[in-house]
Amino acid sequence: MRHVISVLVENEFGALSRIAGLFSGRGFNIGSLCVAETAAPNLSEMTIVTRGSDEIIEQIIKQLRKLVPVRKVTDLTGTDFIDREMVLVKVKANTATRAEVLRIADIFRGKVVDVSPTSYTVELTGDEKKVDAIIELFKPIGVLELVRTGKVAISRTTKTARR
Amino acid sequence: MRHVISVLVENEFGALSRIAGLFSGRGFNIGSLCVAETAAPNLSEMTIVTRGSDEIIEQIIKQLRKLVPVRKVTDLTGTDFIDREMVLVKVKANTATRAEVLRIADIFRGKVVDVSPTSYTVELTGDEKKVDAIIELFKPIGVLELVRTGKVAISRTTKTARR
C-alpha cells in the first residue's frame, strides 16, 4: 500500500541520510521525497512517498521517532489530506507543435515559464494523476527534459472542508 | 556559495541514503532536496540545494559520479536555469482576516486549495524569494501549517530565451 509520511526534523548533518537509510535497509524504495525548510528556524519538513506492507511501515515509523533529530512523524495515509506536486517540463515546440503545446498547457492551467525557438517549458501543479496526464500528452510531441518535485501534503483541518 | 545540483539516478535501494551521506560526511547541510520519477522508467531526478565552498562541492560531485546508480550529475550553479518551488500554507482565516488572506493570495497568484471555518490553505509556486515573501506576509495573520517542496531546476535551452 502507498504511504505518505511527513517528518519534522532538525536541520542536522546526516539526518536525511539516516532517514533514507531506514527505508532502504528494509528494502523499501522511496517513490518521492521532498525536504525543505519550515517557517521555524532549524526545522525542516520532509514528505516521503513509499509503497509497502503496513506492518513494516509501522516499524519504520517507530524507528524514525527514535532518531534524535526527528521531532514528529505523521503517517497521512488513511487521513484526509491534500497533496500536490509541481513539474517543470520542457517540450519540443516548433511551428507545427507550438499551438498544441499551448492548448494542452491551458487545459491543465499550466504556465509557460520559458520559451526558446525550439521549446516551451511549462510549469504545472496538481495531484499525481494530473501531472502524469499532462506528461503523457506531451510525450508524443517530444519531452526534452522534465523534473518533478514529488508530493507534498498537508492535512485538511475539518471534514466540512472536504469537497 | 549556494549550489543547485541535478542528479539523474537509477531507482535503487539506498541510492538516496548514499548520496545524502556524501554531503553530510563533509559537513554539508542539504538546504532542500527533491527526488521524484522522470519520464523514463527506473530513473529518478534529484535536485539538491546546498551551500559550501566550490572546491569541496567539486569533490562531492566527483564522488557522486562514481556511485553506481548515478547516471548524470549537473551543477547548475553559474549556468542559465529556471528554478521554482511550491508551497502549501495553511493560514488562520476568520471573519477578520479572511479578506486579507485572499488579497495576498491573489497578488502572488496563489490558489486557495482548501477552506475550513477557521483556515484557508493556499498553494503557490515561484522562486525562493517569492515563496519567502508570501510566508512573511502570512506570518502576522497566523501560519498554522506549511510545507515546501524545495527547489527544482531546469536549464534554459538558449540564450535567446532569457527575459
Image (tube, coloured by chain):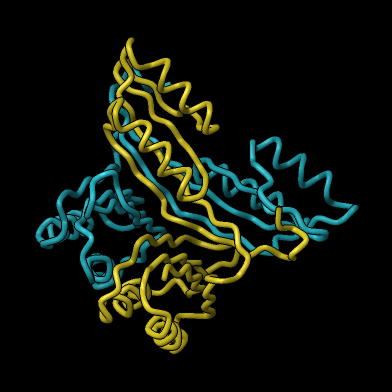
Chain colours: A yellow, B cyan
Closer-to-camera residue (B100/B35): B35
Q: Residue at x 59, y 67 (%)?
A: A40
x and y, in percent, of residue A96 in the image = 32, 11
Q: Residue at x 74, y 58 (%)?
A: A161
Q: Is residue B91 above or below residue A80?
A: above
x and y, in percent, of residue A53 in the image = 38, 78
Q: Is residue A3 above or below residue A18?
A: above
Q: Is residue A85 above or below residue A25?
A: above
Q: Quadrant of residue B9?
A: bottom left
Q: Residue at x 76, y 43 (%)?
A: B102
Residue at the limit of the structure toward the right, as seen here: B95
x and y, in percent, of residue A64 in the image = 42, 83
Q: Quadrant of residue A14?
A: bottom left
Q: Quadrant of residue A60?
A: bottom left
Would residue A54 appear left or right of B77 to someone viewing this image?
A: right
Residue at the limit of the structure toward the top, as seen here: A95
Closer-to-camera residue (B57/A121): A121
Would residue B17 appear left or right of B61 to someone viewing this image?
A: right
Q: Is residue A51 above or below residue B134?
A: below
Closer-to-camera residue (B44/B77): B44
x and y, in percent, of residue A127 in the image = 51, 49
